[in-house]
Image: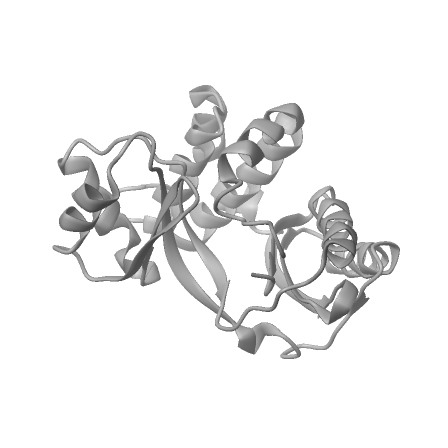
Amino acid sequence: MAGHSKWANIKHKKGAQDAKRGKIFQKLSKEIMIAVKEGGNNPETNSRLRLSIEKAKSANMPSDNIKRILTKSDKDNSSWKEITYEGYGPGGVAVLVNCLTDNINRTSASVKSNFTKGGGNLGTNGSVSYLFEAKGIIALDSLLYSFDDIMEIVLEADILDIKEDGDVIIIETLPNKLISTKELLESKNINEFLSSEVSKISSSTIEVDEKIAEKLEKLIEILEDNDDVQEVYTNVE
């Protein structure tokens, strides 16, 4: 969005999330359950689970909550499925919506309603997904760490890019290199992360004016308030 940056605002978003902690814990719990279903409940051998647990801890989810989820049986997790919806927001902005659901019919209807309410429209499979690529993203506070120091460290790793956006240092990796890159940073006493996750990044971005930006933010808020929606991605710069 013109004048808005996802990465530069990440610290403020984390603060806003505190007010919605219950809903966030619910979404994080589902992420952990899916990871367990996919690769077992050992984070040492299941990289997706490890990332999900770290994400939950960074959101201050109690350890007891995490332990309870990890001890659930595969039967408890079997009904959950991942599904992605594609569509367009105000101004023709591409929108990708990742969901975890135990009822696809319910989720499809609610996401379609969300798009309509937010001034967008649901698209067909493949309509916008080709614009997005999965990448590992590590975000650090440049007020805590020097960009030059971080760059010197990650040059030892197989990263895709490192850049600054406002007061946030962004490191991009291949999805399967995210954990090893984070471990390298931790070995150099870099321990405070704003974010470390696999995300969908648009290969080409667009700028929108403030009017469209406000409408798009409303659509994103509506989608993120949907219990079945885990992540919302757009191709706005």
- The image quadrant where one finds the C terminus is bottom right
Please indicate whether residue 118 sits to the left or right of residue 227 in the image.
right
Closer-to-camera residue (170/97): 170
Closer-to-camera residue (28/121): 121
Please indicate whether residue 213 sits to the left or right of residue 16 in the image.
right
Report which quarter residue 146 is drawn in.
top left
Please tell me whether residue 44 is drawn above or below residue 17 in the rendered image.
Answer: below
Counting from the top left corner in percent of width and height, residue 134 is at 44, 64
Counting from the top left corner in percent of width and height, residue 158 is at 19, 61
Closer-to-camera residue (236/59): 236
Please indicate whether residue 211 sits to the left or right of residue 42 in the image.
right
Closer-to-camera residue (49/124): 124
Coloring scheme of the render?
A: one colour
Counting from the top left corner in percent of width and height, residue 20 is at 66, 28
Instruction: Look at 75% across and 64% down and name the residue there.
Output: 89
Instruction: Look at 23% across and 50% down and name the residue there.
Output: 181
Instruction: Look at 26% across and 34% down and name the residue there.
Output: 145
Instruction: Look at 66% across and 79% down and name the residue there.
Output: 127
Please indicate whether residue 85 sits to the left or right of residue 64 in the image.
right
